[in-house]
Amino acid sequence: MKGLKKKRRIQVIAVAAVALIASTALIGYAMRDGINFFRSPSQIADTPPAPSEVFRIGGLVEEGSLARGQGETITFRVTDGAASVPVAYAGALPDLFAEGQGMVGTGRLVDGQFMASEILAKHDESYMPKEVIDILKEQGVYVTPDAEVSMN
């Protein structure tokens, strides 16, 4: 009788392990298209991704690079201080989008140009995505905003 209980327990554990592995594999398979990796312009210049890979790029909009009025497509360059990547976007830009400001875009790199499907801009004077701040700090470009100090 003890042998039967032990055998049944091992079977239940084995079935549970197989079910766990199968569910993890199915979740990973379902999420494969929903994961977008973040890259800086320097990382893209060093190792360009495949044209079929969707990823996110972030940095500052390069001064003097914003060109509007070429049909619906807007072009500009995004930089992290060490490298810059040309970006093309067809659509309405966020209201706070401007040269010299932080941005994050989602899209593909095609023939050396980032074809953006989505552009996000900072939402107030002090916000910048953490990934962009980290990369700009590595390049020595980012300066921490002055914090107000109270003398109470």
Image: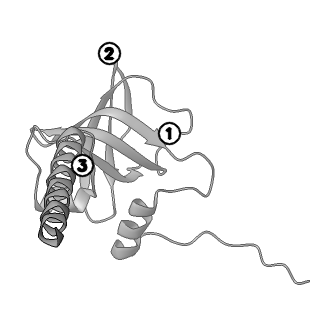
Task: Name which residue lies at 19% across and 65% down.
Answer: 5
Residue 24 position, x and y percent, is 21, 51
Q: Residue 132, located in which quarter of the rendered image?
A: bottom left
Name the quadrant containing residue 6.
Answer: bottom left
Residue 65 image position (x, y, % from top left): 35, 42
Q: What is the secondary structure assignment of the residue under circle 3?
A: strand
| Point 50% across, 41% down: residue | 98
State which quarter of the image contains the N terminus: bottom left
Q: Which residue is mark 1?
A: 97
Kindly identify which numbered label has been placed on residue 152. none
Numbered badge on residue 85: 3
Report the residue at 63% width, 49% height from top. Answer: 124
Instruction: Classify mark 2: helix, strand or loop.
Output: loop
Q: Which residue is mark 2?
A: 71
Q: Are marks 2 and 3 in contact (CB under 8 Å)?
A: no
Sequence order check, earlier mark of 3 and 1: 3
Look at label 3 and name its amino acid: Val
